[in-house]
Image (cartoon, rainbow, N blue to C red):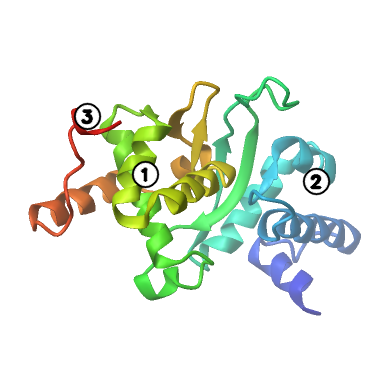
Amino acid sequence: MENFGESLEEAIGLTETPKTETHYYSEKLKRAAHLLLFKRGKMPGAREWELKLRLGKNYEEILNDFGRILNELDLEVKKVREESSADPMSSAQEPEDRYLVRLKSEMTLSESRLCGWRIDNLAALAMTIAYVISKQGVAPRAEVEKILSHKFGRWRSMTLVDIFVRTGYVREDETGLLRLGWRTKSEIDLKALMTLLFETRSEESLPEFPPDNELP
């Protein structure tokens, strides 16, 4: 870690900049790394106002340089728009921009085991996202729980949907309707997911969703 500042300077071509200015800028790059890489709450990354406060008005330039460093590690800085809260008591009524770090390429199955999620929970998330997409982006929570209950049981399906809502993969409004969350849109290649699911379904290894008249 002692040479981290020097490596940052070399990576973005700051070696010919005056020493004081170079040190100041590399400190901001390290601060950007701290904000984006270390989880400080339930959600990853940092909001735009946090970056402006900690990095200054030129935060976008700093993030671009940080992204060039991450590119060598198959990572990238992603800007996403958070959805406004459906809770009328929430202070976060207006949508906000959030920046986070994500993989540029796809994660292998063995790597996915290291992300902190159980494989069956990831399967449940894929089922949830696929069902919401199949319903034109809006699906009643009760229907999603019914779909999941066929594989995971009633009580666990309710818990799983709570987790997906809490972590930002889906969002729920006051009427109990589910939509894709900002984290799904930023982390998941939806086109690749649906292609994979259709290919799996064609091999008859994935059960079809039951018709609407079979749902409660």
Q: Which residue lies furthest to the right in this view?
A: 20
Q: Which three-letter amino acid code belongs to the residue tagged 2?
A: Leu
Q: Is residue 212 above or below residue 35?
A: above
Identified at 14% across, 52% down, the residue is 201
Q: Which three-letter amino acid code belongs to the residue tagged 1?
A: Thr
**Classed neighbour count for the residue bearing mark 1: other residues with Cα under 10 Å, few (<14), some (14–19), many (≥20):** many
- Which quarter of the rendered picture does the C terminus lie within? top left
Q: How far apart are marks 3 and 1 (CA)?
A: 15 Å
Element at label 2: helix
Q: How far across and down, in percent of the image, does residue 68 sit? A: 57, 58
Sequence-first disc among 3 and 2: 2
Q: Name the residue under label 1.
A: 128
Identified at 31% across, 56% down, the residue is 151
Q: Is residue 54 above or below residue 83?
A: below
Residue 171 appears in view: yes
Q: Which of 42 and 208 is in front in this view?
A: 208
Foreground mark, 1 or 2, reads 1
Residue 190 appears in view: no
Q: Distance between the residues labelled 3 and 2?
A: 51 Å
Q: In this view, does 109 lie above or below 92?
A: below
Q: In this view, does 54 lie above or below 48?
A: below
Element at label 1: helix
Q: How far apart are marks 1 and 2 (CA)?
A: 37 Å
Element at label 3: helix
Q: Quadrant of residue 7?
A: bottom right
Q: Mark 2 points at which residue?
A: 55
Q: How far across and down, in percent of the image, does residue 98 sit? A: 63, 39
Q: Which mark, residue 212?
A: 3
Q: How far across and down, in percent of the image, does residue 189 sit? A: 36, 48
